[in-house]
Image: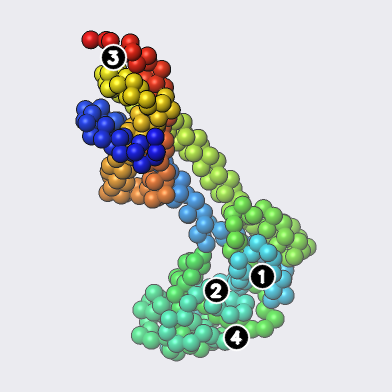
Amino acid sequence: MRLRALLREAWATAWAAKVSSILTVVVVMAMCLAALVTVGRSAAAAFDVADRMEQEGARRLSVVDTRDGGFVNARTLAVVRHVSSVESADALGAPFDAVNGLIGPGGTRLPVWPVLGEVDHVGEIVRGRAPRPGEAAVSASQLRTWGLAEPVGYLTTVDGMTQYPIVGAYRARPPFEDLAAGGLVVALPGAEGRELRVVIDDVASARSTVRSILSILAPTDVQGVQVDSPAALAETARDLNAQMSGFGRTLLLLILGAGGFFVAAVVLADVLIRRRDLGRRRTLGVTRADLIALVTLRTLITALLGAALGCAGGWIINQVSGHPTPVDFTLAIGVLAGLVAAIAALPPAAYASRLDPVDVMRTP
């Protein structure tokens, strides 16, 4: 029998056997709905953890010179930026308190960080221009705290010995959000930094990147080096994802197995009820393979309808409840449910194809 004829007959028999078709739709719909509401939420959480680990804040590592060893400087910074696993690298000096020079020592004290080189990676200039060596930019969110209406004027140290002209305002970039609390000063050439902040391309390469950076910095006193690395965070996230994935796979197999069992029971009951119709088809010359294909396709048609309804309902429920499930995962659940239903229909279909058509037709 040709495929087109099989599909036509499968649709006709599915429409004729409304009770078994509706039961199959309900079972597959419940299967998809249960999978998405349970396993789908776990998958959404796993995707969320993976997405958070890809953010710059999670991929940041820092090396702090706690004893003024001088190994954080423009030369080592340039070399670190060329490490293959480094996405960006910036060096900061020791922060100091400063006040609005027009107000004087009685003004509000806010921290200021010297930056080695340009400030593009550290903050986005939103007003004015980027500072040059010896110039300052203030955080746009702290203008009122500084007592400024516009980013003009100058900052001065608390002792009044050093002044920095203000040329712009900035918005801190990730992962330098803490620098939004004050201002930035571009350090003079030859100045040394205190902290090296690096954004790596992948948290999995944190340990190897730390080793490469330390070999470049080559501190003479290892006791004066403080390293803050996301390696432990990456391992924790990896273990958490593995546990969630294992739990999700087990639960998904249980849901699909239970759904497949009920689909097989529905198809077997339908085969037993309609065995005279199937026997008549065998008497008229339909092969066993065509009969198996007919029963399986009929089940698959109704299963796909149930999968569409269940996946749509589960996706909407997760969206409304604040656990959005990825579309590709939702589609995969629907495909799996359809395949499970088709496979579950094979044993009853094979049983139907093995019935003796003469005996079936003689059965009252």
Circle 4: residue type: Pro
**Mark 3 highlights which residue?**
361
Instruction: Determine crowd level at label 4: few under 14, some 14-19, many 20+ residues with C-alpha closer than 10 A.
Output: some
Mark 3: amino acid: Met
Decide: few, some or many residues near mark 2? Use Cα within 10 Å; few <14, some 14-19, many ≥20: some
Q: Which quadrant, please, contains the N terminus?
A: top left
- Residue 67: where, in percent of width, then height? 69, 64
* Relative height, residue 320 to residue 89 (above, below): above
Viewer-closest of 323 and 221: 323
Q: Amino acid at mark 1?
A: Arg
The amino acid type found where label 2 is placed reads His
Q: Which residue is mark 2?
A: 121
Q: Are marks 4 and 2 in contact (CB under 8 Å)?
A: no
Q: Which residue is mark 4?
A: 133
Q: Nearer the viewer, mark 4 or mark 2?
A: 2
Determine which residue is flagged by label 1.
81
- Closest to the camera, between mark 3 and mark 2, is 3
The residue at 38%/84% (across/down) is 148
